[in-house]
């Protein structure tokens, strides 16, 4: 598909848009900018891809290439707006609440506490560590791909991931024990 797009096949470009739009939009919204801006950046990305298709090389991972390109477009937008310096970008990794029926209220309460705990712990991490976690565990990118997307070396990515996971592990013991106690107490009632 990438080769077809590069040779001028408009349908192949349309397939790329259809296949990767949701992933790109989800990633773009993590920069905490307006959804319309993310859509504009994605549209601009695909427009530039089409206009520059003859200069673009083959890639091993289309997803990786597009994520890196979108990140570049969004950071360019943010810098042009002088809204947020790069270090202040908020990488909120949300965990969905389970809001089913009344029979799941205990589970919902536990999940709500757990969700708030996870969000608070993720929010306490530095932005680069949150971004590395997101790219690794939500987008399944490899360390070399993350390094290229984030424009850092591989060791830095490994350090970001190691530090973030270490911080999360140490903070997880207390909430995990609390959740077990709440769950046991509710099930005994």
Image (tube, rainbow, N blue to C red):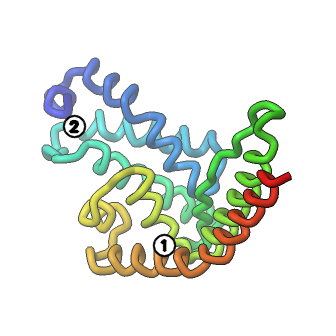
41 and 96: which is toward the camera: 96
Query: Which residue is situated farthest in the front direction here?
Result: 188
Reading the image, the residue beneath label 1 is 128
**Distance Cα–Cα, label 2 vs label 1:** 31 Å
Residue 2 vertical position relative to residue 130 in the rendered view, above or below: above
83 and 110: which is toward the camera: 110
189 and 13: which is toward the camera: 189
Mark 2 crowdedness (10 Å alpha carbons): few <14, some 14-19, many ≥20? some
Which residue is depicted at the point 42% across and 56% down? 137
Quarter of image, res 135: bottom left
- Left/right placement of residue 5 relative to residue 149 reads left
Mark 1 crowdedness (10 Å alpha carbons): few <14, some 14-19, many ≥20? many
Residue 15, percent across and down?
Answer: 32, 24
Disc count in the image?
Answer: 2
Under circle 2, the secondary element is loop
- Left/right placement of residue 55 relative to residue 29 reads left
Q: Nearer the viewer, mark 2 or mark 1?
A: 1
- Badge number at residue 146: none
Q: Quadrant of the N terminus?
A: top left
Label 2 or label 1, whichever comes before in sequence order: 2
Reading the image, the residue beneath label 2 is 53
Marks 1 and 2: in contact by CB < 8 Å?
A: no
Which residue is depicted at the point 80% across and 54% down? 188
Residue 4, percent across and down?
Answer: 16, 26
Residue 87, percent across and down?
Answer: 56, 75
Which residue is depicted at the point 28% across and 76% down? 153
Under circle 1, the secondary element is helix
Residue 26, percent across and down?
Answer: 52, 44
């Amino acid at each position: 598909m990438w080769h077809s797009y590069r040779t001028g096949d408009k349908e192949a470009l349309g397939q790329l848009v259809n296949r990767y739009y949701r992933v790109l939009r989800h990633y773009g919204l993590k920069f905490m900018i307006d959804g319309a801006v993310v859509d504009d950046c994605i549209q601009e990305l695909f427009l530039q891809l089409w206009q520059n298709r003859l200069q673009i090389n083959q890639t091993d991972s289309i997803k990786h290439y597009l994520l890196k390109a979108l990140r570049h477009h969004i950071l360019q937008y943010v810098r042009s707006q002088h809204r947020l310096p790069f270090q202040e970008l908020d990488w909120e990794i949300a965990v969905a609440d389970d809001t089913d029926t009344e029979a799941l209220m205990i589970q919902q309460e536990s999940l709500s506490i757990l969700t708030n705990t996870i969000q608070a712990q993720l929010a306490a991490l530095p932005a680069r560590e949150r971004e590395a976690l997101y790219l690794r565990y939500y987008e399944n990118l490899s360390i070399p791909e993350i390094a290229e997307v984030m424009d850092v070396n591989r060791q830095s990515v490994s350090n970001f991931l190691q530090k973030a996971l270490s911080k999360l592990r140490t903070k997880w013991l207390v909430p995990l024990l609390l959740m077990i106690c709440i769950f046991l107490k509710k099930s005994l009632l």
